Image (spheres, rainbow, N blue to C red):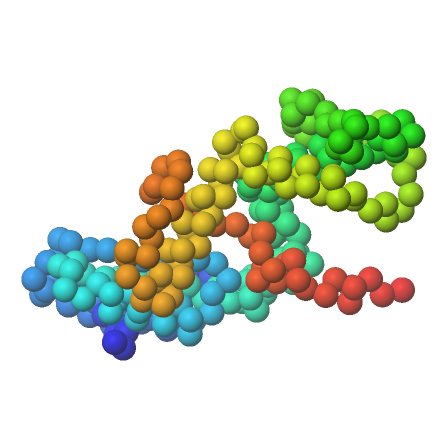
Amino acid sequence: MALTKDHYIELKDGAFDGTSKDDLDNLFKTLAAGSHPDSIVIHFHGGLVDVAPAMQTAENLTQRYQGINTYQIFFIWETGVSEVIEQEGGVLSFIEAQLGQIGQEEVFKQLLMRVLQFAKAKVDAANAGELRSVDGKLDLPDDADVWQELRVPKDGREPFSDVHAAIADHEPLQNEEKQQFHDILARDANPTLQDEVQKIVRGYRLTKQANSSTSQGAMRGIEGGDPTAITSTLISPANPALSYPLTAFWCP
């Protein structure tokens, strides 16, 4: 079903673009003349979305909502990669902004804590002459100690900056260490990471559902935590800030 202008508002950088005053007046007139003027659903799509795919998603959702007694209004933000980079002041500013946002994501903080915990244990094992438990696993520092290093420093220093590694460059992880890291993530006693992963999965499935006109029943079977809680993450190969060829900027 084609999306008509009485069901969407197009914006760019916070201002009307593609939607005129007459279009907006007509939208409200159509809404007022409808059978359910007091029942409205307003949709906002996510970031880094060009106009064309945003329109396609809106059309898919319009088709899915046929027969539901509500008036659908979609906000189409011109937030494609090129537009966002331009608004951020250039490529490097865009990447810096994206990485800053990633650093504030709860799932990133949880993963960072585990990676730092294993890195500290790996360095400690090297400094102690590779002494470790008989099963080949690393002796991990307490979670609380790692969180303390991550949260307390206010002077810009790196966590565990007083630890000096006697470890060779590109020191590989042993199979036992890889399995240990996998098991820690899979069986984390702290529910925060698992909760965040579940919210990301729900958000991802809702997005796929909207983009493909999948029935709402496809959301069933996601268990754990609040079944209505969703979130998204910028930690994705699809994020241009993580896949941009940075080597292009490091020219002598």
Where is residue 214, by image quadrant?
Answer: bottom left
Residue placed at 63% from the left, 59% from the top?
241
The answer to whether residue 5 is left or right of residue 91 is left
The x and y percentages for residue 27 are 21, 67
Where is residue 125, by image quadrant?
Answer: top right
Judge whether 167 appears above or below 94 on screen: above
The answer to whether residue 46 is left or right of residue 99 is left
Residue placed at 32% from the left, 50% from the top?
220
Q: Residue furthest front?
A: 134
Q: Quadrant of the N terminus?
A: bottom left
Of 238 and 4, nearer the camera is 238
Residue placed at 41% from the left, 49% from the top?
202
Judge whether 88 appears above or below 226 on screen: below
Judge whether 72 appears above or below 119 on screen: below
Number of numbered tags placed on the structure image: 0
The x and y percentages for residue 54 are 40, 68
The x and y percentages for residue 76 are 38, 65
Residue 250 in view, yes or no = yes
Q: Quadrant of the C terminus?
A: bottom right
Where is residue 120, by image quadrant?
Answer: top right
Judge whether 42 appears above or below 230 on screen: below
The answer to whether residue 137 is left or right of residue 228 is right
Residue placed at 48% from the left, 58% from the top?
47
The x and y percentages for residue 60 are 31, 69
Residue 153 in view, yes or no = no
